[in-house]
Amino acid sequence: MADSEAIGLLELQEMIRDGVESAVPDKLWIRAEIASVQAKANGHCYLELSESEDGRLLAKARAVIWKGVYFALRQYFREATGSDLAPGMQILARVQAGYSELYGLTLVIDELEPQFTLGAAEMERRKTLEKLEAEGLLDRQAALSLPDLPYALAVISAEDAAGFGDFCTHISNNAYGFKFRVDLFPATMQGESAPESIVDALESVEAAGGYDAVLILRGGGSNLDLACFDDYGLAFAIANCPLPVFTAIGHERDRHVADIVAHEAVKTPTALADLFIDCAAAEDERIGSYGNRLRLAFAAKLSAMENAVAMLEQRIKAADPRGILSRGYSLVTDDRGIVVNSAASLSKGQRLRILFADGKVDVEVK
């Protein structure tokens, strides 16, 4: 082929650009997943979008939100969803296809639909719940028993998290003075790496042994911040944990898949601290009731013994000759002190002694 028949790279790129711009002249709404996102210091936001099916990558493309649009669009998206754009997020975006001779195909985003992102997360959550139910894992944790007096608690949380600090302060300064062993197993508690990090921490707890329960703590956050707690792999690990797993994730309105498969879920770390304090208080009350019952039983036994002694004293007192003599009777004995109870047994000249209440008299039988 002659060199005269070849075209330059620039000319080829211009042809592709013209083809792209003529094929897609208008803005389009597209569905895609964010593979990566970077907000630059110059104000522009660069993304890589992708589409997958059954774990297989089907397509990917570069995208950009120019700084003139990005600030307002980010604020709007954050207010609607409670989160910034992040990897793994499903988005519905309005784009203009553009082609650069230097940078290739780029999709310029000028609008986002946050409700689509929230709806996609909810749909994925429902699929996860259906899968767990089909596998019989939703109620597995509920079958486990918590010891009557749980003491050793393994906590999975971010080391510097305010929720973990609140939990430790609340459970340590309880009004009863109960003592607990609290060991932290640090983990990432938000973002796409959180499920794997929490699962690793669960495995570390199981390997360490000696714990009564596992506590997964995280304070509040947006729906998308907490979406990691709807992850199937994390829910599977919680359901199959041999120890009772308790969760304190998010706000009152939130209920994540991790909460549903856990042994029990409360809404705040301090509420979870109260749960274990209440367990100790209930056991303390139960043991105290045994003490009360023993004291009552001992008091009843002692009272019965005292009554028996009193009755015996009365019988002894009733049989005491002095009591008989005080009622006007007298007692006759021979010279050996043996009671004489028959006149026929006496003989003339026999010496006797008659006892009265106020004295005695020696006599002789005539």
Image: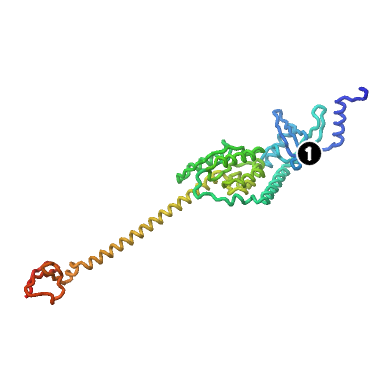
Residue 242 or 132: which is nearer the viewer? 242
Q: Position of residue 40 (x, y in %)?
A: 70, 29
Q: Which of the 4 image quadrants contains residue 3? A: top right
At x 72% / y 32%, what residue is drawn?
Answer: 45
Q: How many numbered badges does the structure rendering display? A: 1
Q: Which residue is mark 1?
A: 58
Whole-percent x, y for residue 80 in the image: 69, 42
**Observer-nearest of 312 and 163:** 312
Toward the top, the furthest residue is 3
For the N terminus, give its image quadrant. top right
Q: Relative to residue 354, is residue 207 depicted above or below?
A: above
Picture quarter with the C terminus: bottom left
Is residue 340 depicted above or below 285 in this figure? below
Is 167 situated left or right of 70 in this image?
Answer: left
Q: Nearer the viewer, residue 331 or 196?
A: 331
Under tag 1, what secondary structure? Answer: strand
Q: Position of residue 147 (x, y in %)?
A: 51, 49
Left or right: where 315 falls relative to 48: left
Left or right, 303 with reference to 65: left
Which residue is at a point 54% across and 49% down the rendered structure image? 146
- Vertically, is 327 above or below 144? below
Q: Which residue is drawn at the image coordinates 53% and 39% (left, top)?
A: 183
Colouring style = rainbow
Three-letter amino acid code at disc 1?
Answer: Leu
Q: Residues within 10 Å of mark 1 (few under 14, many from 20)?
A: few
Task: Identify the residue at image location x=86%, y=36%.
Answer: 23
Q: Report whether 219 appears left or right of 80.
A: left
